[in-house]
Amino acid sequence: MTRLLFVGDVVGRPGRDLVTRGLKAIVSAHRVDCVIVNVENAAAGFGVTPEIANEFLDAGAHVMTGGNHTFDKKEILPFFSQESRLLRPANLPAGAPGAGHYVARATNGVNVGVINVMGRVFMHAIDDPFRVVLTEIEKVKKDAAVVLVDFHAEATSEKVAMGWHLDGRVTAVVGTHTHVQTADERLLLQGTAYITDAGMTGPHDGVIGVERQAILSRFLTGLPQRFETARENPRLSGIIIDADERSGRATAITRLSLSLKDVDALIAQAASTR
């Protein structure tokens, strides 16, 4: 059995601090073999920088996925040619830097394929994710039976459809982007683990990661506001998936939602067992 941990959209410094502070303890407590982190909101809510990406790798991430904010920071563009563990949606137009898939070597020696695609409903006009993802699966299946797809999309219906589209083809389809963890985790009929959204790793007392007063003012007045990352009540949201490395089928999927207090308790637990 190979255990995957997917960490939902990391937002700003509060989210980054949770991951860099507690990831190793979480991995130890849950006996995780491979860590995938969505990092497209990691730099003050908009994009990721090379320095931040390296922080996640140093903390123990095997692969980093993206979404509609992947290229918000200009300095990340050349980094894609240097670091193949940072993904962007595979269905972006030809010419976009980087790749949409990567095969990682988990700590137990098992190869894990990770694919990143982005939805089109209420999103940018990009290539068809339902077709592109099949091509990406063919690429990673040459080297990995265990395959996780991060589907970065707005519409629940599009995400659920992608789950059924890939049922039996991949180990897991994990939705990202909405920053609200859903309670519909399940194993689909042919063994694919599915959840509509893994949730947000970051401040939960704002509005999906942004300071609430600015959002309230925007709704109340209709005037533009400067959005700043919230700080209060940081939580780490994610998914743990157990997979049979021979068949590539998932055997379990579990939601994870940890407060700062929970993370500190795991850190103390890890320290006491050394």
Image (cartoon, rainbow, N blue to C red):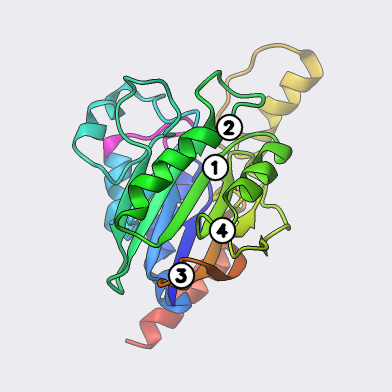
> Which residue position holds label 4?
168
Q: Secondary structure under badge 3? A: loop
Q: Amino acid at mark 2?
A: Gly
Q: Secondary structure at mark 1?
A: strand
Q: Which residue is mark 1?
A: 151
Q: Earlier in the sequence, mark 3 or mark 4?
A: 4
Give the percent coordinates (x, y) of residue 180: 67, 46
User: Does the magenta run of residues contain 42?
Assistant: yes
Q: Earlier in the sequence, mark 1 or mark 2?
A: 2
| Mark linked to residue 75 | none
Whether the residues at callouts 2 and 4 have beta carbons within 8 Å, the answer is: no
Q: N-terminal of the two: label 3 or label 1? A: 1
Q: Pointer 3: what residue?
A: 247
Residue tagged 2 = 119
Q: Is residue 151 above or below residue 24?
A: above
- What are the residue bounds of the magenta stretch? 40-50
Residue at point 47%, 41% (across, down): 134
Give the residue type that dot 1 points to: Phe
Q: Residues within 10 Å of mark 4 (few under 14, many from 20)?
A: some
* Image: 88 above or below 103: above
The mark closer to the camera, 2 or 4, is 4
Q: CA distance from mark 1 to mark 4?
A: 16 Å
Whether residue 274 is visible here, answered yes or no, is yes
The mark that comes first in sequence, 1 or 4, is 1
Q: What residue is rendered at 50% in x and 46% in y?
A: 150
C-alpha distance separating marks 1 and 2: 7 Å
Which residue of the protein is positioned furthest toward the right in this rendering? 220
Kindly report the distance in space between the C-alpha atoms of the residues bearing marks 3 and 2. 28 Å
Which kind of residue does numbered mark 3 sit on? Ser
The answer to whether residue 56 shows anywhere in this view is no
Contact check, label 1 and label 2, Cβ < 8 Å: yes
Residue type at numbered disc 4: Gly
